Each structure stands twice: as structure tokens, then as C-alpha cells.
Amino acid sequence: MLSRMKTLIAAIAILFLTSLAFAADKTNLAKPTNKAESWRLEQHEGGKGTMKIDGDAVVFETTAVDSENWHVQATMTGLDLKEGKEYEVSFKAKSTPDRSVLFTAMIDKDDWHAIGLSEQIELTKDWKDLKFTFKAEGVAGEMKNRVSFMIGAEKGVLSVKDLMIVEK
């Protein structure tokens, strides 16, 4: 009897831990930050850059700039954001040299309009924890929403890790 009770308790514990892991995974709408396939590096006009994975972070380097910050963008596309819902976005970031980077949520199709999040973030060589809350307005259906780092204003390296997007 005691053996069956221990087995039952172990099974319940495994089911509970599995459900917690599934729930945690289900709530983060962002793709894995440290996977190259989670990102699209956009380069327009004279803006140029590179992307690589470094452990648990993604690293973007802006190597050539022109007159527009959006001419080099690091975007995570295919986000399933719902109209009128409130979201919390959190991540860690750093940059060399110290610089200001625009972080936005927008639709991922022509006309590329913002959908409630546009933050100028000040970064240094040290990891910085960032957290923003926004209400999604004007979203596009069919997984056509994205978050973007506008990194074409100046040359430098941006590192990002632990990106999470959670419905509030």
C-alpha cells in the first residue's frame, strides 16, 4: 500500500511539474531569443549589419549607417498579438558603444504602423533589465505582428537575451 501511494505521489508531482512547464512555455509569445531563425535582420539603403548567436544571446552589429535608424532593424516576426490586449515585454540588453536604440511593436506588413509600443532605450556595455507594458492597438491578424530594434542610427553592437512577451 505504501509503495502504491509513493508511486501515486510521484506521478502527481510529475504531472504538476509538466503542467507548469507547459503553462510557462505557452504564455511566452516570443520565439527563443538565442535562435537565429527567431530573427530577421533587415538592411535597407546604405544600412548594413550582421547577426550571430552567442550563448544565450543574439548579437546584432551595425556596420554601416546612413540617414535613417530603420535602415538596419533586428525584428522578431510572426507574433500572435490580439487587438485590445495588454502585454508585458521584458528582456536584457547591452550595447557597445553606449547608445540609444528604438524598440517598437508594429505590424509586419505594409504600412508597418506601430501597435502601441515605442520606447527609446539607453544602453551601455553592462546588461540592463528592461520591461515595458503596452496595449496592442491596430494589430494585424495572421501572425503578422513583430517587435523591432531600430539599430541603424550608429555603428555598434547590440546584444539581447531572455526576450519575453506575455499577455497581462
Image (cartoon, grey):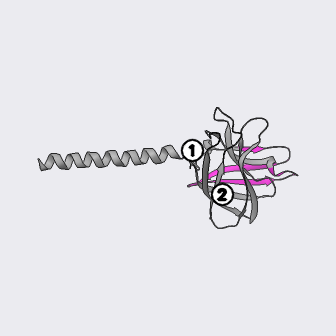
The residue to which callout 2 is attached is 159
Q: Residue 14: x and y, percent? A: 31, 47
Which range of residues does the magenta coloring cover?
41-69
Q: Quadrant of residue 129?
A: bottom right
Seen at 17% across and 48% down, the residue is 5
Seen at 74% across and 35% down, the residue is 109
Q: Which numbered marker is on residue 114? A: none
The residue to which callout 1 is attached is 29
Q: Quadrant of residue 115?
A: top right
Q: Residue 59: x and y, percent? A: 66, 54
Q: Nearer the viewer, residue 51 or 3?
A: 3
Q: Is residue 40 visible?
A: yes
Seen at 69% across and 39% down, the residue is 139
Q: Residue 28: x and y, percent? A: 54, 47
Seen at 71% across and 48% down, the residue is 116
Outermost residue toward the left in this view: 1
Residue type at tag 1: Leu
Looking at the rendered structure, the secondary structure element under dot 1 is loop
Categorize mark 2 by other alpha carbons within 10 Å: few (<14), some (14-19), many (20+): many
Residue type at tag 2: Ser
Q: Nearer the viewer, residue 100 or 115?
A: 115
Outermost residue toward the right in this view: 67
Categorize mark 1 by other alpha carbons within 10 Å: few (<14), some (14-19), many (20+): some
